[in-house]
Image: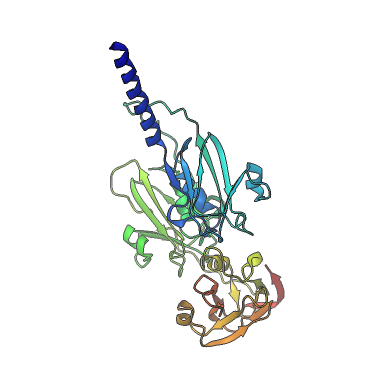
Amino acid sequence: MACKLSLATAAVVIAAALLHSVAAQKTHVVGDSLGWIVPPGGPIAYETWAAQYTFTVGDTLVFNFKTGDQDVAMVTKEAFASCNSTNPIELKTNGPANFTLSSGGEYYFIGTMARHCPLGQKLAINVSGPTGSPAPSSTPVPTPPRAPVMYTVGDELGWLVPPGGEIAYESWAYNKDFIVGDSLVFNFTTGEQDVARVTKEAFETCNSTNPIALATTGPATFLLTSGGEYYFISTKARHCPWGQKLAINVTGSSGPAASPAAPPPSTFVPSPPRQAATYTVGDKLGWVVPPGGPIVYSTWAYDKFFVVGDTLVFNFENGTQDVAVVVSKSAYESCDTSNTTTVLTTSPAKIALTTAGEHFFTSTYPRHCYLGQKLAINVTAGSSIGISGHG
């Protein structure tokens, strides 16, 4: 009888262990609602997604994509770095595609479709082995004090309209521990950018009418003088809606956050005349339906200074694209190409910027504009001389 009880007890223990093991396994949908696509803004989208999760042996990755439009390959580290899909470890072409993480270590995945990997459809993760970490102590260990840190916002990116939208600054901030006494440094070119500290409501609506503090001279430094949430945006037209915004939480003092002193006002220095420039729209991407939607061409244009006399060059494959000059902002926003001033169907299509103001361009092909093949720029009154090339 004792033997039977021992065997029964052992069976219960084994069953419980198996249930615990199964329960511990997780299914991760890569990119969550984004799915598996060429992501807006490049590989930072999937880097950011992966940073939120801990992957362990037994977990499953699910790549959601439309069969025929995408695929996913598991590759070596070297193939991942060079976007080489010639000899994948495993290739799946039907979506959704599942990969079980059967062992600990590094895993690398890419899209093998033309230019998908170089444009950011790639994911690298690290998988923990089957041995779990020891349970944390029930007694919290206080974090030792540290010296104040001066953080450069965006690091090498600086403070600008970021490629890919606000996820760039969210990614920069997510793994940092800001405390009272730290400083934020916003690196930007005076006259091209600014930075305003605002309320949460103003941050969410991109309202810059009543900032807590405004700095117009770069680099601008803000001291974090008290605990709580801090919000920063650019007041330049459309910069905040395009992602030039940063929200952080500062630990330390529980008192209300004090407003840092505003820097002295900057003195505007007019730019000297420059040679007329020729811009190739999208650079190497050319003029196509862009991966990631209209933010691609918005990002291309944001750091460029267009003046009367400059020229835009639209490179595309004849018979597959065209470029239309749209008559108004409303027509541009609604993708209405029924009343255009110019439609060019032969590549390379060159358009001279002969007047100051807003200029709008799109494609007349069905759904191309809706899918992001559109460009809006602002042209400043002439300060150009001569002719020069510009990529």
Q: Where does residue 214 sit, x and y in percent of width and height?
A: 41, 61
Which quadrant is home to the C terminus?
Answer: bottom right
Up the image or down, 348 lies above or below 106; here it is below
Q: Where does residue 247 sit, x and y in percent of width and height?
A: 40, 53
Identify the image quadrant of residue 74: top right
Q: Residue at coordinates 36% horizontally, 30% vertically from top-left? A: 142
Residue 159 appears in view: yes
Up the image or down, 221 lies above or below 237; here it is above
Q: Which of 343 and 190 is in front in this view?
A: 343
Residue 211 appears in view: no
User: As drawn, which residue projects farthest toward the top?
Assistant: 2
Q: Which of 373 and 204 is in front in this view?
A: 373
Which quadrant is home to the N terminus?
Answer: top left
Say left or right for 210 vs 350: left
Say left or right for 81 vs 166: right
Say left or right for 322 vs 214: right
**In this figure, what is the number of numbered marks?**
0
Colour mapping used in the image: rainbow
Q: Residue at coordinates 38% horizontally, 65% vertically from top-left? A: 206
Say left or right for 171 vs 279: left
Q: Where does residue 60 sit, x and y in percent of width and height?
A: 47, 42
Q: Where does residue 54 sit, x and y in percent of width and height?
A: 45, 39
Q: Residue at coordinates 47% horizontally, 52% vertically from top-left? A: 31
